[in-house]
Image: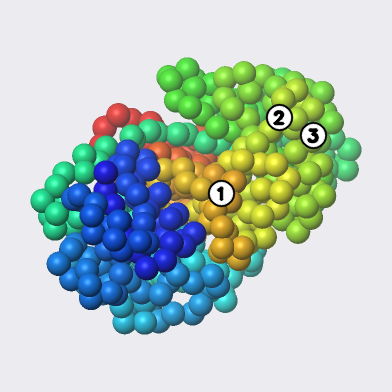
């Protein structure tokens, strides 16, 4: 049993130690009584500025884990025990570093956002430090454990965090042409004629006549991936029509039947509409729509456009009844926004508490590779290999975000199935 002393026990410190030790199956206790700490056998560590613990394994703390509010500290890269960590107002602190990144603290302080009011990866602290493509929280956790073992000449027997590949798919547009009716069909057709897009005009006619498969109808490919043994997740957009919400009407019987059928081989969750990010009533309504179609409770979600506004989005998801969210990534940059690839409980910094919402970090999104970063297929394959190797090494879930319209080698996505297959490959 590892004993850790602290001058005070805070929610932030308890949460940080839980992140480090629970998944690794390390038994520990956190105490603030000096006498019981002194009597405890090795291994033990003092997280304290008290000189009385000078002979014990000790880390001098910054103030971050003892605070209740969000504070603008001076945060810099520093060296601790020959490792790079963060310093807070001049105090290097590996435990505070873990909390700062995992709690998304830096994102709360960012003032500049993109056109969709999202945090910008290229403006993040992790990007600035060149840590965004690294599981920095896991690396720090292993360094912290190694420090304790070296200082106490004990072995904590930390378990390796399991590695899994989880393919996930967002269904923003179930079909390119099918089931589009009324004015939507008229407007799309008119647009093609105005542009004289002969390819789309011909393709639309062939699809609607039943002579050709709709290019976005890749659900058989998703099913084939599930049959290979992967835990496939699918997130379906069911919001009312709007500028950024353009899926087939949720009332359409064929659409509803398809959603139900996909749920038989892949777990279907909600893809809340763009509008729902400013309307909790819309979020509730869309959740009810999917629950009616699937005839079961829906508790998994991923935000459309990865539109997360901290802390409002997560608070709304939690209050509406979602338990698991798969939105944790930057749209413009690849990597690990919270320094983790495994699921973990979101810490609500505003209320200074551990929430009931579990976050599932995304390792990469298809659109980040192709549209935001403009990488070639070859560059993307190499990038995916590198990210997957990081997750294999330090543990967690390699969660890949694709769309039904991007996996069929169609249009600007021609040849990109290679990148998806690299994700699913057993090779490092």
In-image side of 141 versus 406 (left or right)? left
In-image side of 394 versus 190 (left or right)? left
Which image quarter: residue 183? top right
Quadrant (top left/top right/bottom left/bottom right) for the N terminus: top left
The residue nearer to you, when weighing 146 against 284, is 146
Q: Residues within 10 Å of mark 1 (few under 14, many from 20)?
A: many
Task: Tell me if residue 270 comes above or below residue 67 in the rendering.
Answer: above
Residue pointed to by mark 1 = 327
Which image quarter: residue 86? bottom left
Using the image, tell me which numbered label, if any, was put on residue 34: none
Kindly state the secondary structure of the residue where label 3 is placed.
helix
Give the CA distance from mark 2 to mark 1: 20 Å
Residue 118, position in %: x, y?
59, 63
Residue drawn 70% across and 45% down? 272
Give the CA distance from mark 3 to mark 2: 11 Å
Residue 11 shows in the view: yes
Using the image, tell me which numbered label, if any, was put on residue 289: 3
In-image side of 404 versus 93 (left or right)? right
Q: Earlier in the sequence, mark 2 or mark 1?
A: 2
Kindly state the secondary structure of the residue where label 2 is placed.
loop
Give the CA distance from mark 3 to mark 1: 20 Å
Residue 224, position in %: x, y?
49, 20
Residue drawn 54% across and 44% down? 358
Residue pointed to by mark 2 = 297
Residue 264, position in %: x, y?
62, 18
């Amino acid at each position: 049993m590892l004993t850790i002393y602290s001058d005070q026990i805070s929610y932030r410190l308890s949460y940080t130690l839980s992140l480090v030790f629970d998944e690794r199956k390390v038994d520990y206790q956190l105490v603030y009584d000096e006498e019981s700490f002194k009597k405890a056998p090795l291994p033990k560590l003092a997280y304290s500025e008290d000189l009385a613990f000078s002979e014990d394994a000790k880390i001098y703390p910054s103030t971050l884990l003892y605070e209740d509010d969000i504070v603008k500290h001076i945060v810099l890269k520093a060296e601790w025990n020959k490792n790079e960590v963060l310093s807070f107002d001049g105090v290097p602190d590996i435990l505070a570093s873990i909390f700062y990144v995992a709690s998304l603290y830096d994102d709360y302080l960012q003032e500049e956002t993109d056109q969709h009011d999202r945090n910008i990866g290229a403006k993040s602290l992790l990007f600035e430090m060149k840590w965004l493509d690294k599981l920095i929280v896991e690396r720090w956790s292993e360094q912290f454990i190694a420090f304790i073992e070296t200082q106490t000449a004990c072995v904590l027997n930390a378990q390796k965090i399991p590695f899994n590949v989880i393919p996930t798919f967002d269904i923003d547009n179930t079909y390119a042409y099918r089931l589009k009716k009324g004015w939507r069909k008229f407007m799309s057709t008119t647009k093609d004629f105005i542009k004289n897009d002969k390819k789309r005009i011909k393709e639309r006619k062939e699809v609607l006549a039943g002579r050709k498969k709709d290019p976005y109808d890749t659900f058989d490919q998703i099913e084939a991936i599930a049959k290979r043994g992967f835990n496939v997740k699918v997130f379906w957009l069911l919001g009312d029509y709007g500028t950024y919400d353009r899926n087939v009407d949720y009332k359409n019987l064929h659409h509803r039947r398809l959603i139900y059928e996909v749920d038989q081989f892949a777990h279907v969750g909600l893809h809340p509409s763009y509008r729902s990010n400013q309307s909790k009533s819309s979020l509730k309504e869309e959740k009810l729509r999917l629950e009616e179609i699937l005839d079961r409770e829906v508790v998994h979600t991923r935000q459309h456009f990865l539109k997360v506004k901290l802390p409002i989005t997560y608070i709304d998801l939690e209050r509406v009844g979602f338990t698991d969210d798969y939105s944790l990534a930057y749209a413009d940059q690849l990597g690990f926004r919270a320094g983790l690839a495994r699921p973990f409980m979101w810490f609500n910094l505003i209320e200074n508490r551990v929430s009931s919402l579990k976050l599932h970090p995304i390792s990469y999104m298809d659109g980040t590779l192709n549209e935001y970063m403009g990488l070639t297929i070859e560059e993307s394959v190499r990038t995916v290999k590198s990210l997957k190797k990081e997750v294999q090494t330090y543990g967690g879930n390699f969660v890949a975000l694709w769309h039904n319209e991007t996996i069929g080698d169609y249009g600007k996505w021609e040849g990109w199935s290679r990148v998806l297959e690299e994700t699913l490959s057993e090779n490092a």
